[in-house]
């Protein structure tokens, strides 16, 4: 499992999550396809989620699942001692306690990433809730 990335790559990853297509494409073409596909997986693209699982990146899929509220995904990250990724997932799932943990434990890039993921997941949830509300009327 590839879990260590230079700070500048994590910052680029956060930009890709924010919606910067050029940065996402750069990650894909420069040795970090898992981070580019993570962006697609975060947006619920099934093929990207499967690619992460099939190509040795279940920890990245666990971060996404944890960000979606899957407690078992967070526990799995903890089991494999991926504590910073566990807090990334929890912070992206609106845990301010985990966001503080990332900051206090010298993971500012992951704290930024958590905020970006939080925005994406909350936007998706709001959009889904709007569709359900319209459908129910």
Image: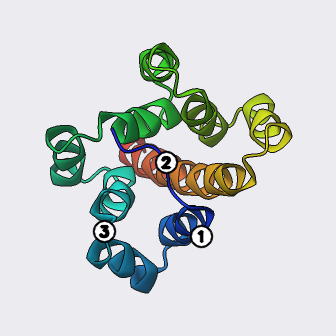
Q: Residues within 10 Å of mark 3 (few under 14, many from 20)?
A: few
The structure residue drawn at horizontal position 15% and vertical position 52%, both measured from the top left corner, is 47
Which residue, given by chain and number where applicable, does mark 1 sit on? Answer: 8
Residue 94 to residue 46: above or below: above
Q: Quadrant of residue 31?
A: bottom left
Q: Residues within 10 Å of mark 2 (few under 14, many from 20)?
A: few
Marks 2 and 3 sit apart, C-alpha to C-alpha, by: 13 Å
Mark 1 or mark 3: name the one nearer the start of the chain: 1
In this rendering, position of residue 58 left or right of residue 108: left
Q: Position of residue 131 (x, y in %)?
A: 41, 51
> What kind of element bears circle 3?
loop
Q: How is the image coloured?
A: rainbow
Marks 2 and 1 sit apart, C-alpha to C-alpha, by: 12 Å
Residue 31 tag number: 3
The structure residue drawn at horizontal position 47% and vertical position 34%, both measured from the top left corner, is 68
Front one among 66 and 119: 66
The structure residue drawn at horizontal position 17% and vertical position 49%, both measured from the top left corner, is 51
Mark 2 or mark 3: name the one nearer the start of the chain: 2
Q: Position of residue 118 (x, y in %)?
A: 61, 49
Residue 4 tag number: 2
Q: Position of residue 14 (x, y in %)?
A: 56, 64
In this rendering, position of residue 65 left or right of residue 112: left
Front one among 81 and 53: 81
Residue 27 tag number: none
Front one among 133 and 46: 46
Which residue is outermost to the bottom? 22
């Amino acid at each position: 499992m590839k879990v260590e990335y230079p700070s500048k790559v994590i910052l680029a990853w956060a930009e890709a999550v924010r919606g910067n297509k050029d940065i996402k494409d750069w990650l894909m073409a420069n040795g970090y396809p898992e981070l580019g596909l993570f962006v697609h997986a975060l947006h619920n693209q099934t093929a990207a989620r499967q690619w992460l699982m099939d190509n040795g990146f279940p920890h990245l899929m666990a971060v996404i699942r944890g960000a979606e509220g899957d407690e078992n995904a967070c526990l799995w990250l903890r089991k494999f001692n991926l504590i910073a990724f566990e807090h990334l997932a929890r912070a992206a799932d609106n845990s301010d306690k985990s966001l503080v943990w990332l900051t206090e434990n010298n993971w500012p890039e992951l704290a930024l990433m958590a905020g970006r993921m939080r925005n994406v997941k909350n936007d998706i949830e709001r959009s889904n809730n709007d569709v359900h509300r319209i459908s129910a009327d």
